[in-house]
Image: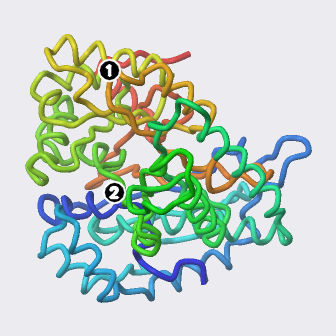
Amino acid sequence: MIITSLLDTDLYKFTMMQVVLHQFPGAQVEYKFKCRNAHNKPAPGAANFDLAPFVNEIRDEIRSLCSLRFHDEELAYLRAMRFIKSDFLDFLGLFRLNEKYIAVSTLPTGEIDITIQGPWLHTILFEIPVLAIVNEVYFRNTCKSPDLGQGRRRLDIKIGQLRAENLGDLKIADYGTRRRFSKVWHEEVLRVLASRLGTAQSPGHEPGAPGQLAGTSNVLFAMKLGLTPLGTMAHEYLQACQALGPRLRDSQIYGFESWAREYRGDLGIALSDVYGMDAFLRDFDMYFCKLFDGARHDSGDPFNWGERMLAHYASNRVDPRTKILIFSDGLTVPRTIELYQQFRGRCQLAFGIGTNLTNDLGYEPLQIVIKMVRCNGQPVAKLSDTPSKNMCDDERYLAYLRQVFEIPQVA
């Protein structure tokens, strides 16, 4: 059994789920799975990305996932978070994922299809553990004797790079649950990082660059290893607001205002790439610049994004040094160091590294996602600054969305 706890997911699933419970309890949604690895066809010499042979195994793991409930100690851990409310915890105490809301099959093309459809409140927790299941099932079948030594050597190189001189203030976080090689490997990586880089919770760690592991998005490992759990909102939240808000053009503004209404200044990191940077900056006015603690980058050129964010804050009479820029798009340690060197001292910085931390053993990782495609029967979409990350099955709606948000078609 791969997933043994409902806490084995990212924190932002709980923060969004609480908003859904309080503000959108009747919303109905649909999610679709996508593998971005060249349509499941591997490059010469790479692994075979065919997932269809593992459909039954994936179904069995999902069936086990749907048998889980929150334990008292898990709810107590969530209760200690200042932004988690008591009625939400009461709901989680009764919660269980229902297998009737998820279907796993093989398409006529031979590709795997995963569809999640049902009440948002009862389906939001599927995404992360299901992706982790697909990854682990795939790798335990295709890499039966994994080269863990290679993974440890690569991790050692990353740690050496982070502990270089003049990088003591550079802090990274683990964002790698959904595409990890395995749950066991994920835990080993976190234990090694905590021991060698240090955390705010471990004053007796190995000397060198103290406190460089800021935390993890994974709530289970945060609880188990004494790390800081990290996360705010994901794309699905702002996508759903396309159907839930009063007017499509105001859906991004509506999403930010609804978030602020729920958390009253807490969890103040805005996601910037659901409609692209131009549309984000048009909506992220002086009010939001002052209200939110910062913004998160997840597509497009990160250096350009950072410079535009700093200029935007300055033009709205906000000191960028008081705001946080979070970088989280496909980061490697060398790229993280480059970004740190460009922006250090000009703002507060945070870096979330995912696949490159939890699935770097020498095998090409799966580039798999599960994205919301409908809410209340209406298409919803993401139009990011990286076109390959866009996901919508209704071209007419995409064209309309581009028109409403003044987003040019990329050739």
Q: Is residue 154 above or below residue 288?
A: below
Please name whichever residue, 162 or 145, is drawn nearer the observer in this view of the structure.
162
Left or right relative to 51: residue 179 = left
Query: In the image, what residue type sits under mark 2?
Result: Tyr
Look at mark 2 in the image and give the residue it sits on: 12
| Residue annotated with mark 1 | 309
Q: Position of residue 178 (x, y in %)?
A: 54, 59
Q: Is residue 26 visible?
A: no
Q: Residue at x 11, y 54 (%)?
A: 262
Element under disc 2: helix
Quadrant of the rendering where the N terminus is positioned: bottom right
Viewed as shown, does residue 227 lie left or right of 192?
left
Q: Tell me whether the residue at label 2 lies in contact with that at label 1, contact meaning CB atoms closer than 8 angstroms.
A: no
Whether residue 117 is visible = yes
Report the residue at 31% width, 44% height from top. Answer: 239
Question: Which amino acid type corresponds to the residue marked 1 in the rendered image?
Answer: Met
Residue at 75% x, 49% y is 154
Q: Characterize the local packing of mark 1: few (<14), some (14-19) or many (20 or more) Cα atoms within 10 angstroms.
A: many
Work out whether 309 lies above or below 235.
above
Q: Is residue 317 above or below residue 292?
A: above
Looking at the rendering, in which quadrant would you find the C terminus?
top right
Left/right placement of residue 337 relative to residue 280 reads right
x, y percentage for residue 215? 43, 55
Q: Residue at x 63, y 67 (%)?
A: 188
Q: Nearer the viewer, residue 264 or 348?
A: 348
Describe residue 305's horizontal placement relative to residue 242 as left or right: right
Q: Secondary structure at mark 1?
A: helix
In three-dimensional space, the C-alpha distance between marks 2 and 1, rounded to whole angstroms, equals 23 Å
Q: Residues within 10 Å of mark 2 (few under 14, many from 20)?
A: some
* Disc marking residue 285: none
